[in-house]
Structures are given as structure tokens and as C-alpha cells.
Image: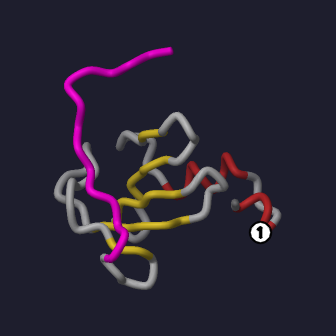
Amino acid sequence: MCNKSGGYAPRPIWNELTNKVTPWFESKNYEYIYFNCHDRLWYVDNSMGMGCYLSKPESLLLPPLNGWVDLTGRRSGAPKMEFLDSVVEE
């Protein structure tokens, strides 16, 4: 998204937004969850890199299970997270 909207190089922006320590998670359809160290919130971004939902952290190592809101602050339609016991690798 940064590359499309503002002409920024994606890697430097990603490195600036994350602290290279907290994990990030990507789905099979390329949506992803990451901790933004600037505003100290977890984000869900769509496959185009556009922010869709955010939540206050319960932990810096795992995204919160609840409390997600869209970028306008609405909870309607916001995701609920769950963690699986195992990781499926392709």
C-alpha cells in the first residue's frame, strides 16, 4: 500500500513500523497482522496492505483475541482471533 499511495519503498516503511522483534502473521490470502511500534497497536491489513482493523495490545508477542475495531472505531464486523495448536506449512 505504501508503495502505491505515496511512492515509498515498502521495506523501509515496514522496518520503520515494526521493531523487527515482535512477530507478524500472514494468512493464505496474504492478509496480515502486525504490531505497529509507532502507535503501539496491533493491526489487521488486507492483502493490498491497507489497514482494516486495530486493537490495543494485551501482549507484544501475540495479537489480542478480542477488542478489534475498524479504523473508524466500530466493532461491528471486527474479527475475533483464535490460536491454533499447530502450524500448517505448505
- The amino acid type of the residue labelled 1 equals Ser
In the rendered image, residue 20, in percent from the top left (x then y), is placed at: 45, 42
Residue 78 inside the magenta-drawn segment: yes
In the rendered image, residue 31, in percent from the top left (x then y), is placed at: 53, 47
In the rendered image, residue 62, in percent from the top left (x then y), is placed at: 25, 45
Residue at image coords 70%, 62%: 2
Against 31, residue 68 (above or below) is below
Residue 49 inside the magenta-drawn segment: no
Instruction: Name the residue nearer the viewer: 16 or 44.
Output: 44
Residue with the most extreme front position: 77
Residue with the most extreme top position: 90
Residue at image coords 57%, 40%: 29
What secondary structure do most residues of the magenta stretch adopt? loop
Instruction: Name the residue nearer the viewer: 17 or 90.
Output: 90
Quarter of the figure with the N terminus: bottom right
Q: In the rendered structure, which segment of residues is drawn in magenta?
A: 76-90
The residue where tag 1 is placed is 5
Q: Quadrant of residue 72?
A: bottom left
Q: Quadrant of residue 36?
A: bottom left
